[in-house]
Amino acid sequence: MEEEKFKLLRRFQYSSEAVIYQGKLESEGIEVFLRDQNLIDSTMYSNLFGGIKMYVKTEDFQRANEILNDVNLFSVDDEQ
């Protein structure tokens, strides 16, 4: 059985932000794994631990990155 590989996609300071993006990616069929979410939520030292880390499978990385870039572009562009 081949071992699955994962790649760091983004880091977030707040778990609420990470969960919103996680929901968007999962609605597009991309499996998402969040790391350090409970640690950050319980200690409030997000910067010390490098934030909440969002991982996706390596083969989904490019597509996930494009989806999140589109979401970010839309959120700051009043013309769309």
Image: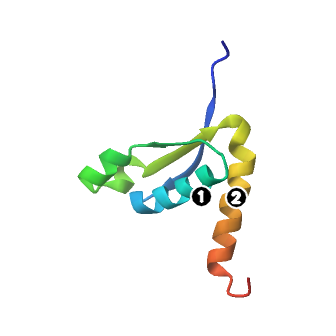
Q: Which mark is residue 67?
A: 2
Q: In the rendered image, which quarter is residue 70 located in?
A: bottom right
For the residues labelled 1 and 2, the Cα–Cα distance comes to: 8 Å
- Would you call the spot at circle 1 few (<14 residues within 10 Å), some (14-19), or many (20 or more)? some
Assess whether mark 2 and mark 1 are in contact (beta carbons under 8 angstroms). Answer: yes
Q: 32 or 41: nearer the eye?
A: 32
Report the front residue among 61 and 23. Answer: 23
Q: How is the image coloured?
A: rainbow
Tell me which residue sits at (68%, 75%) in the image.
74
Left or right placement of residue 70 versus residue 6 in this view: right
Instruction: Estimate the x, y position of residue 39 in percent, counting from the top left.
Output: 31, 45
Viewed as shown, does residue 73 lie left or right of 26? right
Camera-side mark, 1 or 2: 1
* Residue beneath the point at 59% across and 58% down: 24
What amino acid is at disc 2?
A: Ile
Q: Disc 1 marks which amino acid? A: Lys
Q: Residues within 10 Å of mark 2 (few under 14, many from 20)?
A: some
Any part of residue 14 in sight: no
- Say which label, 1 or 2, has the lower sequence index: 1
Image spot of residue 73 (x, y percent): 69, 72
Seen from this angle, which residue lies furthest bottom?
Answer: 79
Residue 10: image x %, image y %?
56, 52
Q: Secondary structure at mark 1?
A: helix
Quadrant assignment for the N terminus: top right
Q: Which mark is residue 15?
A: none
Q: Which numbered dot is residue 24?
A: 1
Tell me the SS state at disc 2. Answer: helix
Residue at the far top: name it: 1
Is residue 51 in sight in this rendering?
Answer: yes
Q: Position of residue 20 (x, y in %)?
A: 50, 61
